[in-house]
Amino acid sequence: MGAWVARDAAARGMRVALFEQGDIASGTSSRTSKLVHGGLRYLEQGAFGLVAESQRERAVWLQIAPHLVRPLPFLFPIYRGSGPSRWKVRLGMVLYDALALFRNVEPHHMLTADEARQLEPALRAEGLVGAARFFDAQMDDARLCLEVVLAARGDGARVETYTAVDGLIVRDGRVAGVRIGSREVFGGMVVNAAGPWLDRVCAMADDRGRRLRPTRGSHLILLPLLRGHALVLSAQRDGRTFFVLPWQGLTLIGTTDQDYRGDPAAVACTDAERAYLIEETRRVLPDAAVEPSAVLAEFAGVRPLVSAEGVSASAVTRGDLIEEGPNGLISIAGGKFTTARAVAERVVDLAAKRLGSSRFQECRTATTPLGGGRLVSSDEREAWTTRATGLGLDATQIEALSRTYGARLGALLDLATERGAERLHPGLPWIVAQVDWAVEQELARTVDDVLRRRLPIALGPHRRDPEVIRRVAERMGTLLGWNSAVKRDHLDRYLAA
Ligand SMILES: Cc1cc2nc3c(=O)[nH]c(=O)nc-3n(C[C@H](O)[C@H](O)[C@H](O)COP(=O)(O)OP(=O)(O)OC[C@H]3O[C@@H](n4cnc5c(N)ncnc54)[C@H](O)[C@@H]3O)c2cc1C
């Protein structure tokens, strides 16, 4: 949210400073299920407005960041005596298409059991009566968030990572700025986009109200289980919806939804959540290798949901709340990664109104491509492929780099030409020059920033590979002037995380 607020405000001509206590997207925004989606399951809650807005925003993301947001085909298998019936799924699908104004990648199709198993043979045959096939989109959450921040910087925003706000400056009952250690930064407007830390930031101005109902969601990563479709599944134990998704050549299973009042920075998948996800996935993919020993990695995040009493965690709305406190502080609770741009637009509209809107331009974030999202001509793409091949990169590497950097690929190849295109590891498509790029262009400061959020290594089979970790640390050490003790410290912290 904060990234989009900074991006929008800077693009409209405001002077903006963005302070992030850790790395970009190190909070919830790198711990999502990696879906830019309409939220099929919110139809059951009657949240039609949220679904329609999410579908509109999915179309925006696909337009402004096509390298990082890609259409993903889904199957919703229907089993006799478990989960929603065929007519209910069909009705939901018609509604889902309608709320996207019939402009999704493709309209849904209802399939027979045989057709579904032809597409995904691992699906349990027993009791399968059919499936719905439809589209949503998949993203690289951390890199998207980074793209938004880089766009904000491009428009003049000042961005400081590893800079925690530890106090709010209140003058005459109004929040007039923030405190960072002994430093004071004043602004006409302060926006609290601290996600699961929101209430803590409000408390810095002696406002101890509870705006959030934080819930934990966990994911598991396993070797590939599917042929290319994602699955939407209904858990037998509690009827919750969860996903089995193809992701980075692996499988991502998630998520859970449990009330969580602990430290958001210390959130982790529990044994019970791991067992639940494995048991429920095994029901539908009985012959696949889904067992605790097959889990390659896992991660959890905290949803900063809008406070609600008397409902289960998974029934809490995924809608947003923009609150303007009596002290002038604007706080953003709830929302989804998918809808963050739209929420930020409303926040910046409000800020502009308070600051005197005639001074600022209109919001253009829905139509302006993010840096890597610029349309690339086929000539340009061909020229890059020729250059990359000349540098010794193979087709898999070129595809992986192009998906990661989009229209910035040419600039990355310039850097690789200057510094070399050596691979980081024979089993990975990545090159060492990406570490240079991450440090020099993408605000990476720690080994964890590079391995977890600039590249998807920390969640893959090479996450503990000493050679990969050492090479990244060595390169960063050279670029950032680390001595051996600092390097060791970075390695230890990455491994502990
Ligand atoms: C398990 C899970 C799965 C999800 N899946 C999806 C999905 O597939 N699709 C989707 O659209 N949404 C999904 N969501 C929802 C989505 O991730 C969140 O709504 C969104 O990322 C929240 O963004 P945020 O900016 O509010 O919070 P954050 O990303 O947490 O950002 C807040 C930032 O504020 C920083 N901060 C906090 N306090 C301070 C301070 N004092 N000083 C400086 N910085 C501070 C934090 O370090 C943090 O980086 C999922 C959420 C979870 C938990």
Image (cartoon, rainbow, N blue to C red):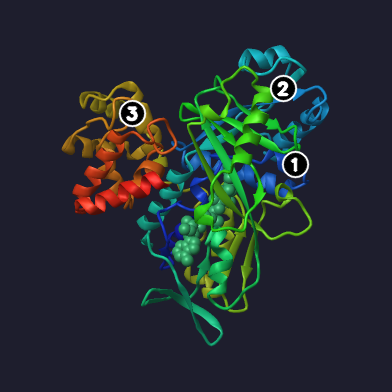
Can you give x and y, in whole percent of width and height, for residue 163 in the image?
38, 64
Q: Nearer the viewer, residue 297 or 26?
A: 297
Q: SS for tag 3?
A: loop
Q: Residues within 10 Å of mark 1 (few under 14, many from 20)?
A: some
- The residue carrying mark 3 is 429
Tell me if residue 485 can be seen: yes
Amino acid type at image mark 2:
Ala
Q: Amino acid at mark 3?
A: Pro
> Would you place residue 311 above or below residue 451 in this image?
below
For disc 2, the marked residue is 131
The earlier-in-sequence mark between 1 and 3 is: 1
Q: Residue at x 72, y 22 (%)?
A: 131
66 and 120: which is toward the camera: 120
Q: CA distance from mark 1 to mark 3?
A: 40 Å
Q: Secondary structure at mark 1?
A: helix
Specify the amino acid type for callout 1.
Leu
Quick check: marks 1 and 2 in contact, CB under 8 Å? no
